[in-house]
Image (spheres, rainbow, N blue to C red):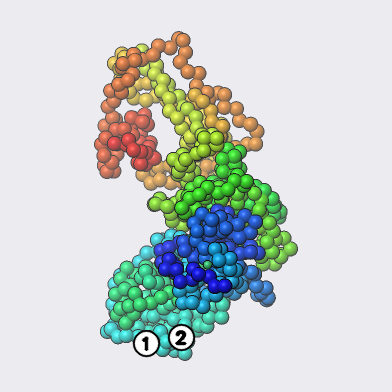
């Protein structure tokens, strides 16, 4: 019996910007490395696992998309007599996936009940081919993010090309100094073709491209075969010895007869190869004092892989999902996944996926492929989960979190809280970020008439100031102490003390009219179940935000917060008149600080607001406030 769906017009290869989930399931971390492989839907390219959970079957039941491509990957046994080579720019020696794994493909039809559909028809063959050639979802996101980091240089911008001609076509072109026809670099200045370096996977090369650049001093070359239909390619500047972006690539290539639209991507780009390298699981299994670390396995003991610089995401996720509130909210292995159009784009689904990944223990198993070092194969570690779907979803549309750059874990936590807070929560489970919420009470007292005003604000974190005390060192000591901190350690209690300390602010009293000012103090009216604390390490040094490395000592002993609880209004205190309290006390901004801030280009209204909020004396403090509140909806 033949499958009747093969000629369906709905079957089309994935477009260049379409996500293809061909690494792991969109509902869980089961992947192509499992014994039954992963099904990729040939209609919408959703990835579904095929083991005991069978999210592929679920996808079929819900979407009625009958045809899937089953991808199964098995490890190839490689004899290695030398340690792996390290990747460096241009000296491309990365192992390719094909060197390490065998990939098994089979097309199945759920509706016709056929397990090995004949794929010789042109339509189905082109879809299968498109799925396998498409960048995997995670790779696509990473390539995009890395490419944003690259810039141009003067050599690219001022490139003067010699008289135009068409270089030899793809079938005939070869290195000008040898007969190699692949791994070729085109000199954008003179049109020379030169081969690259030899690559690990058996791709030959004798570095004739580099030799040409050295001899001719021509700077800019493009790797043929890395050119994408979208018009990007690997561009390298030999003068700068850096990868570059060429905004005029289309024009520069057309000069040598290469028209972008006509080419298909055939080789891995430099960026893709670097990412492959960066994704390799490298870590040290010894502590700083030389003790060997022991790998652990089991529920709650699952590692997260680093995606570029994503340790901020990994540490935040590990912290949150170690909390009972997050576990209770998102870890429900017995539940059927909720029905959504695109699971990979759904926050609820992705948070449940990461909860299951981290907490179930299902993925916390020794993997013989992952050893601590090249030379001690005895202690296998776990592979770790790649949280690419979550990273992409949470970072989507965010100017910083969508990149591969290093980020601040606290900023990320607040961003994630915002997304979670906005999402829907089943009444029985509630919002897990509620556990972080508490109320601060601020007390203002007029120095002259002693009347008081209380106001409250709900928060989900505190940012505590760090007492900064530089360690004075003798000149000869600084050498031996190496990278040790130049600041005295402070205790967490000291930070809290200074956070809740009383200060004097300049305000005009609405009750007695005095300009003597007020004392101001903020204390906790309620306490959260979980208190998120940010240590304010960024100090303004000469108007430049600078990170100061002050060690904060948080001991293992319980910390009592009773002393930071607001006692509330006392019987002996007289409140400011109600009507007057409703109106803002008249406020005059400190003229010197105001002028300072205005000079920096902040609008006057914002400067006044910032000075009002920070005690009306210090332009630095006000500026810090301005940066922190830049995106407040009510800033103006
Ligand atoms: Zn069928
Ligand atoms: Zn699954
Ligand atoms: Zn589908
Ligand atoms: Zn050559
Ligand atoms: Zn040249
Ligand atoms: Zn350059
Ligand atoms: Zn007063």
Q: Quadrant of the C terminus?
A: top left
The x and y percentages for residue 297 are 69, 52
Q: Nearer the viewer, residue 8 or 37?
A: 8
Q: Nearer the viewer, residue 222 or 348?
A: 348
Q: Is residue 394 above or below residue 379?
A: above
* Residue bearing the label numbered 1: 168
Mark 1 residue element = loop
Q: CA distance from mark 1 to mark 2?
A: 11 Å
Q: Nearer the viewer, residue 582 or 189?
A: 582
Mark 2 residue element = loop
Q: In the image, is 263 to the left or to the right of 84?
A: left
Q: Is residue 560 above or below residue 538?
A: above
Q: In the image, is 451 to the left or to the right of 513?
A: right
Q: Quadrant of the N terminus?
A: bottom right
Q: Is residue 480 above or below residue 111?
A: above
* Residue bearing the label numbered 2: 181
Dot placed on the residue nearer the N-terminal end, 1 or 2: 1
Q: Residue at x 47, y 80 (%)?
A: 183
Q: Residue at x 43, y 46 (%)?
A: 546
Mark 2 sits near ligand 4, with its Cβ under 8 Å away: no
The x and y percentages for residue 225 are 43, 77
Residue 491 visible in image: yes
Q: Residue furthest right?
A: 378
Q: Residue furthest front?
A: 1
The x and y percentages for residue 112 are 55, 66
Q: Is residue 80 above or below residue 181?
A: above
Mark 1 sits near ligand 4, with its Cβ under 8 Å away: no
């Amino acid at each position: 019996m033949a499958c009747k769906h093969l000629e369906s017009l709905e079957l089309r290869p994935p477009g260049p910007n379409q996500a293809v989930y061909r690494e792991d399931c969109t509902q869980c971390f089961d992947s192509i490395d499992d014994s039954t492989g992963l099904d990729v839907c040939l209609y919408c390219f959703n990835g579904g696992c095929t083991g005991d959970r069978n999210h592929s079957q679920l996808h079929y039941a819900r979407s009625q998309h009958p045809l899937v491509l089953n991808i199964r990957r098995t490890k190839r046994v490689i004899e290695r007599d030398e340690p792996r080579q390290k990747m460096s720019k241009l000296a491309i020696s990365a192992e390719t996936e094909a060197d390490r794994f065998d990939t098994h493909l089979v097309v199945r039809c759920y509706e016709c009940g056929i397990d090995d559909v004949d794929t010789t028809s042109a339509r189905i063959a082109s879809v299968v081919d498109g799925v396998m050639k498409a960048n995997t979802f995670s790779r696509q996101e990473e390539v995009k993010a890395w490419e944003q980091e690259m810039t141009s240089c003067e050599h690219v911008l001022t490139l003067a090309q010699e008289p135009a001609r068409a270089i030899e076509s793809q079938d005939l072109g070869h290195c000008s100094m040898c007969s190699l026809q692949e791994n070729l670099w085109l000199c954008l200045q003179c049109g020379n073709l030169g081969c690259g370096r030899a690559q690990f996977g058996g791709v030959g090369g004798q570095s004739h491209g580099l030799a040409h650049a050295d001899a001719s001093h021509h700077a800019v070359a493009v790797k043929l075969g890395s050119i994408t239909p979208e018009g990007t390619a690997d561009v390298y500047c030999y003068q700068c010895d850096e990868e570059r972006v060429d905004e005029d690539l289309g024009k520069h290539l057309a000069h040598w007869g290469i028209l972008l639209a006509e080419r298909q991507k055939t080789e891995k780009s430099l960026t893709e190869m670097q990412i492959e390298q960066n994704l390799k699981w490298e870590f040290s299994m010894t502590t700083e004092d030389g003790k060997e670390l022991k790998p652990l396995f089991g529920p709650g003991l699952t590692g997260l892989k680093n995606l570029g610089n994503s340790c901020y995401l990994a540490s935040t996720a590990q912290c949150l999902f170690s909390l009972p509130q997050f576990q209770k909210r998102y870890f429900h292995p017995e539940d059927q996944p909720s029905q959504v159009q695109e699971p990979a784009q759904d926050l609820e689904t992705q948070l449940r996926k990461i909860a299951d990944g981290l907490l179930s223990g299902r993925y916390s198993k020794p993997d013989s492929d992952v050893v601590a070092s090249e030379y001690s194969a005895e202690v296998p570690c776990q592979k770790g989960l790649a949280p690419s779907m979550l990273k992409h979803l949470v970072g989507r549309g965010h100017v910083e979190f969508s990149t591969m750059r290093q980020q601040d874990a606290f900023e990320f936590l607040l961003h994630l809280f915002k997304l979670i807070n906005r999402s829907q929560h089943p009444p029985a489970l509630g919002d897990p970020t509620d556990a972080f919420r508490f109320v601060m009470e601020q007390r203002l007292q007029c120095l002259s008439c002693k009347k008081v005003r209380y106001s409250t604000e709900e928060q989900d974190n505190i940012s505590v100031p760090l007492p900064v005390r530089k360690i004075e060192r003798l000149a000869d000591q600084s050498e031996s102490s190496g990278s040790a901190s130049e600041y005295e350690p402070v205790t967490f209690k000291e930070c809290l003390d200074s956070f809740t300390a009383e200060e004097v602010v300049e305000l005009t009293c609405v009750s007695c009219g005095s300009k003597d000012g007020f004392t101001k103090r903020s204390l906790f009216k309620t306490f959260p179940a979980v208190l998120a604390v940010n240590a304010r390490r960024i100090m303004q040094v000469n108007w430049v935000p600078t990170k100061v490395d002050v060690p904060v000592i948080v001991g293992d002993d319980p910390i009592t917060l009773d002393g930071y609880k607001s006692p509330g209004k006392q019987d002996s205190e007289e409140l400011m008149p109600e009507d007057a309290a409703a109106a803002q006390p008249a406020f005059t901004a400190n003229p010197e600080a105001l002028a300072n801030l205005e000079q920096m280009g902040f609008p006057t209204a914002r400067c006044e607001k910032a000075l009002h909020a920070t005690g009306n004396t210090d332009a630095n403090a006000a500026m810090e406030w301005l940066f922190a509140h830049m995106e407040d909806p009510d800033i103006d």
